[in-house]
Amino acid sequence: MAVAGGIMDVSTWFDLRRKGVACAWVSLEHGGMSKLTEGGSPSSTALGQASSGRRLDLPPRAPKLLPTSPPPQSPPVLECKVKYFTMKRGYSESPATSSLGPPQSKFKHNPEGDGQFLEDESTKIFARKVAEHYSARTNQTLEQREASVIIHLKKLNNWIKSVLIQLYTRRGDAVLDLACGKGGDLIKWDKAKVGYYVGIDIAEGSIEDCRTRYNGDADHHQRRKKFSFPARLICGDCYEARLDEVLADDAPFDICSCQFALHYSWSTEARARRALANISALLRPGADGLAFGNSIYWIRFDEEFSEKKFSSSSPFGIKYKFHLEDAVDCPEWIVPFHLFKALAEEYDLELVFVKNSHEFVHEYMKKPEYIELMRRLGALGDGNQDPTTLSPDEWEVAYLYLAFVLRKRGQPDRTQGNGKRDRGQMHISKEDIMAVGS
Ligand SMILES: C[S@@+](CC[C@H](N)C(=O)[O-])C[C@H]1O[C@@H](n2cnc3c(N)ncnc32)[C@H](O)[C@@H]1O
């Protein structure tokens, strides 16, 4: 996910239109309750352009669920220096101790690989090549940038990053920007009023550009005001180094951002695991307590889940208390959906459709017949006389639910008819109700 603008979907791996990889991890995603806490809402534009031409409105994004954490203690450094560190070898020498547990592979090893999570030389050479490539890219003037054949793509990517940052950043957040490049997102972080920033990149040239940009030396013409947050810059391979050690004094971070660069970790399993182990070790858990909610609902876990980890080996009985105003107030249980899917398959029930309610709205509010149905059912008002619509808090609750469809495997038995009309009744009396079980 984690979050919109995520990693390429494997099914469209070769679809060059989606080659860009943008991703961000935020503290909300950390700690096992992520699916319950994520926000986001459909764009009202898409709805507004629905075929009837009449506008249906939805609330803007759901607000943050969790209490704002106090701004982190920031080191008093406003002039940015770069710290270079030497790269250590992979897991065989320094096993990860993050919440991901020991870095054991679940995947088949490439027979040509070493299978021991040792970084082989070619991996290092490729990482270096990437570093050299980015280091060699010189800063462009505004005119050069505007003349680029991909200027609109660049602007689109920038917009996606800006939206992500605005959606998930809270004032005072401590940010870790993995593969920060030339600091192209510094202004975005400044606008989000972050409290502390650490940028790390493998390309020395880029990190140097980032340093001058941060110090304000790059903007001779624009004379931009100084950034309002203190920062540290680090030059190194963030998919190889033990960042939990390097940044032990800076952690935890509220946000870990990795924009258009996560794919560089995927050259080997060891590097991909190092990336995630670093992120996991440095992020502050997303929920401060064991409860969260808004004005119309709350969810509270018992102390037994204080670690905020749900073991895949005991996926049943993950209980929480659910309160939904005017509807529910009782214990419920988390359904780890991938395990539910696997279990259903054991009973020849295959999953053919699954969508979170937010996705569901996005998808089916593009279809005129369902827009009309929505108008009639009135969840979003009627787009005409009735201006009432879901509140942001209601929209947030909608996110807690998945719609899914299972299909029974196998061929239908054509000899069995469907006619059951003689079985039921057209009026059911109390006595007609059959009791089963105890
Ligand atoms: C497409 S640029 C994105 C830069 C920046 N995140 C942005 O959105 O403007 C990719 C960046 O990833 C960095 N990178 C690639 N591999 C890396 C690694 N192993 N460790 C740290 N940075 C890396 C490159 O040096 C480059 O700056």
Image (cartoon, rainbow, N blue to C red):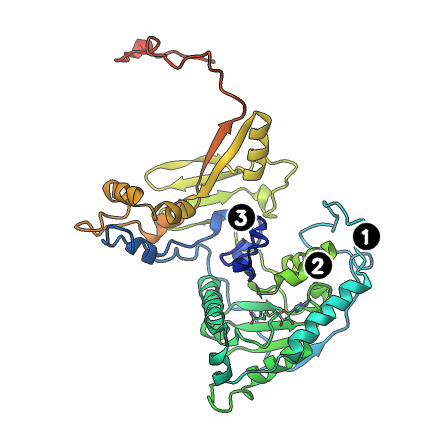
Q: As drawn, is 362 to the left or to the right of 187?
A: left
Which mark, by number, is residue 267?
A: 2
Which mark, by number, is residue 33?
A: 3
Q: As drawn, is 2 to the left or to the right of 115?
A: left
Q: Residue at x 35, y 58 (%)?
A: 60
Q: Could you tell me if residue 65 is visible in this image?
A: yes
Closer to the chain start, of discs 2 and 1, is 1
Q: Which residue is most to the bottom?
A: 220
Q: Residue at x 48, y 84 (%)?
A: 142
The image quadrant where one finds ligand 1 is bottom right
**Where 124 sits versus 213, above or below?**
above
- How much space separates mark 2 and mark 3, taking CA atoms? 29 Å
Q: Mark 1 = which residue?
A: 112
Q: Which one is closest to the eye, mark 2 or mark 1?
A: 1
Q: Amino acid at mark 2?
A: Ser
Q: Residue at x 51, y 59 (%)?
A: 5
Q: Secondary structure at mark 1?
A: loop
- How much space separates mark 2 and mark 1, taking CA atoms? 13 Å
**Where 63 sits versus 246, above or below?**
above
Closer to the chain start, of discs 2 and 3, is 3
Pick the residue in front: 186 or 361. Answer: 361
Q: Amino acid at mark 1?
A: Glu
Q: Amino acid at mark 3?
A: Met
